[in-house]
Image (tube, rainbow, N blue to C red):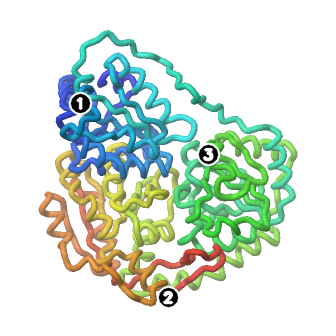
């Protein structure tokens, strides 16, 4: 097992040993070639591996024992599956003779994980281990990336046998696609984009995975096409670029939402075109021609129609379209009615955003201060809830792989362990987790991991003593009735941090926040910054469920 991981160039993994993985961990400590980050909960192991993979571009590895250890990985595996993160989960299992007998700490983890992985392996012979692990890494990192689970019974780990380590593996029914776009579809796309009067580019996480940021920008500049991103696509294009309007969706920028509704040709690349991104799937692009580029053919046409489908790698497809336009000598004048309309939309909502910055310790203003303090290559992770949406709306991501969040599953508790995984991947870069009190409390036990494993990060807790996003929905859609959303006065986050050996501080002004953040970035241990936020503070803009992108709410 260990040699198979060494051959995949694994340097670090995340997990907790247990009865069904002791043989594996015994070999790990003897060989000392792979570092294991000893987490305090298996869910955190999966989220750390996720953060590590997204920042590094490599496959993340998480491990757990059988039964409850394996089932604790499930939320993190599901989050990786929804966000197409390359991850390999290795679990121990009860001995082969006890499988199916309700043995102590037995769970059918391959059955449980089948719907949330690309593939699962139950390894029934030590001779199968090399090919299973080689295949798992191949599957996790090719075509559309995603998690793979390898379940290995304890007695298989103890077997002695002759093994062969394959350089290449095949799996029946699985073909690694070249990612090359079909020339005819490229030609059709070029024609549609040239004839467009109001072109838009919708960028998803697939652009980041394929390293296609430069191609998006070059194509947008040729077409004079505004760029909007999904939550997972945030950071693919610098949000300071003149053509970038920011994120689109339920909590998208108002100008991004309205512009996308007005477009006559939409180039959607590396995105699932999910319900949270475009809201009313049945109304999206009803007056536009949609060009949909994705590496996964199952995504094209799944949520919205594709007038010009292109099954391809994002980078290769965008490059082909750009080269076709350049060959034709096409370059659109930047002074068009569409560009003037985009400027008008920006100006229209500028005053609305200014209103949201007024007052003490407003999250939108905190995000802007944070951007000023951090270097361009700093990494930001988020929890899930209002903290996630304030971050997505008002913190400007400047580089790919620097904004890490749980987009598809929306797993509360993701932000902090993902930050630790990101810091392990990039120890020289500042890492900040923008979290909420509710989300942070779900995985805060791994403050112990950050201290004991020397993984210093900064945690911003937007502390409204409430499940803020649920509270906002109840306030706006349920006649103000609040049901089980108040979290009470405990814990004291400063004392909580100090109990783990981290630093804790509470700030009550913008000046204190900026000063504290600058100090925290120099700290050699994790720093938790507790930031009081009024419980009735809401995230705006917002599109209510069942409404269209253009039906934006700014206050309420």
Can I make out residue 65 in this image? no
Residue at the (21%, 47%) spot, across then down = 454
296 with respect to 476 (left or right): right
477 with respect to 29 (left or right): right
For the residue pair 551 and 255, the one nearer the viewer reads as 551
| Percent x, y of residue 248 | 59, 67
Q: Would you name the residue on which mark 2 appears? A: 556
20 with respect to 379 (left or right): left
Residue at the (14%, 63%) spot, across then down = 498
Spatial CA distance of label 3 from label 2 is 39 Å
Spatial CA distance of label 2 from label 1 is 58 Å
545 over 292 or under it: above or below: below
320 over 198 or under it: above or below: above
Mark 3 crowdedness (10 Å alpha carbons): few <14, some 14-19, many ≥20: many
141 over 203 or under it: above or below: above
For the residue pair 340 and 414, the one nearer the viewer reads as 414
Spatial CA distance of label 1 from label 3 is 49 Å
Q: Would you name the residue on which mark 1 appears? A: 98
38 with respect to 386 (left or right): left
Residue at the (31%, 57%) spot, across then down = 416
Quick one: quadrant of the N terminus? top left
Q: Are marks 2 and 1 in contact (CB under 8 Å)?
A: no
Foreground: disc 2 or disc 1: 1
Q: Would you name the residue on which mark 3 appears? A: 212
Q: Earlier in the sequence, mark 2 or mark 1?
A: 1
């Amino acid at each position: 097992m260990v040699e198979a991981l060494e051959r995949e160039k694994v340097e670090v993994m995340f997990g907790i040993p247990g009865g069904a993985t002791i043989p594996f961990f015994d070999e790990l400590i003897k060989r000392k070639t792979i570092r294991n980050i000893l987490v305090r909960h298996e869910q955190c192991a999966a989220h750390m591996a996720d953060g590590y993979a997204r920042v590094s571009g490599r496959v993340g590895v998480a491990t757990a024992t059988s039964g409850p250890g394996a089932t604790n990985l499930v939320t993190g595996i599901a989050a990786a599956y929804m966000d197409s993160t390359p991850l390999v989960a290795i679990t121990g299992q009860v001995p082969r003779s006890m499988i199916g007998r309700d043995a102590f700490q037995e769970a059918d983890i391959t059955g449980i994980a089948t719907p949330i992985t690309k593939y699962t392996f139950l390894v029934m012979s030590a001779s199968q281990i090399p090919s299973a692990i080689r295949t798992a890494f191949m599957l996790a990192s090719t075509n559309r990336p995603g998690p793979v689970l390898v379940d290995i019974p304890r007695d298989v780990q103890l077997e002695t046998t002759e093994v062969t380590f394959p350089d290449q593996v095949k799996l029946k029914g699985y073909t690694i696609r070249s990612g090359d776009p079909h020339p005819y579809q490229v030609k059709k796309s070029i024609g549609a984009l040239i004839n467009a009067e109001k072109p838009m580019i919708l960028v998803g996480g697939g652009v980041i995975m394929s390293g296609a940021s430069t191609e998006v920008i070059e194509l947008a500049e040729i077409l004079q096409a505004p760029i909007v991103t999904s939550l997972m696509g945030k950071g693919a294009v610098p949000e300071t670029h003149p053509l970038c309007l920011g994120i689109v969706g339920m909590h998208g920028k108002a100008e991004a939402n309205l512009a996308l509704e007005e477009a006559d040709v939409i180039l959607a690349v590396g995105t699932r075109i999910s319900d949270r991104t475009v809201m009313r799937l049945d109304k999206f692009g009803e007056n536009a021609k949609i060009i949909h580029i994705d590496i996964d053919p199952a995504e094209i046409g799944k949520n919205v129609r594709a007038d010009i489908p292109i099954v391809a790698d994002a980078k290769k497809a965008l490059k082909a379209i750009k080269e076709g336009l350049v060959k034709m000598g096409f370059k659109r004048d930047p002074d068009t009615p569409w560009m003037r309309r985009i400027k008008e939309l920006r100006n229209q909502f500028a005053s609305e955003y200014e209103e949201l910055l007024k007052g003490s310790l407003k999250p939108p203003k905190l995000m802007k201060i944070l951007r000023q303090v951090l270097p361009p290559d700093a990494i930001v992770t988020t929890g899930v809830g209002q903290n996630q949406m304030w971050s997505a709306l008002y913190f400007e991501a400047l580089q790919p792989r620097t904004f890490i969040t749980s987009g598809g599953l929306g797993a509360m508790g993701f932000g902090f362990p993902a930050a630790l995984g990101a810091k392990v991947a990039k120890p020289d870069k500042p890492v900040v987790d923008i979290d909420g009190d509710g989300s942070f409390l779900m995985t805060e036990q791994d403050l112990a991991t950050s201290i004991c494993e020397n993984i210093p990060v900064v945690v911003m807790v937007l502390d409204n003593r409430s499940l803020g996003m649920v509270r906002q929905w109840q306030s706006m859609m349920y006649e103000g009735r609040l049901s089980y959303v108040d979290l009470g006065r405990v814990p004291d986050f400063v004392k909580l941090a100090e109990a783990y050996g981290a630093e804790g501080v509470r700030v009550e002004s913008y000046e204190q926040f900026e000063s504290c953040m600058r100090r925290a970035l120099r700290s050699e241990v994790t720093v938790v910054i507790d930031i009081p936020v009024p419980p009735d503070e809401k995230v705006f803009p917002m599109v209510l469920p069942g409404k269209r992108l253009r039906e934006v709410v700014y206050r309420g």
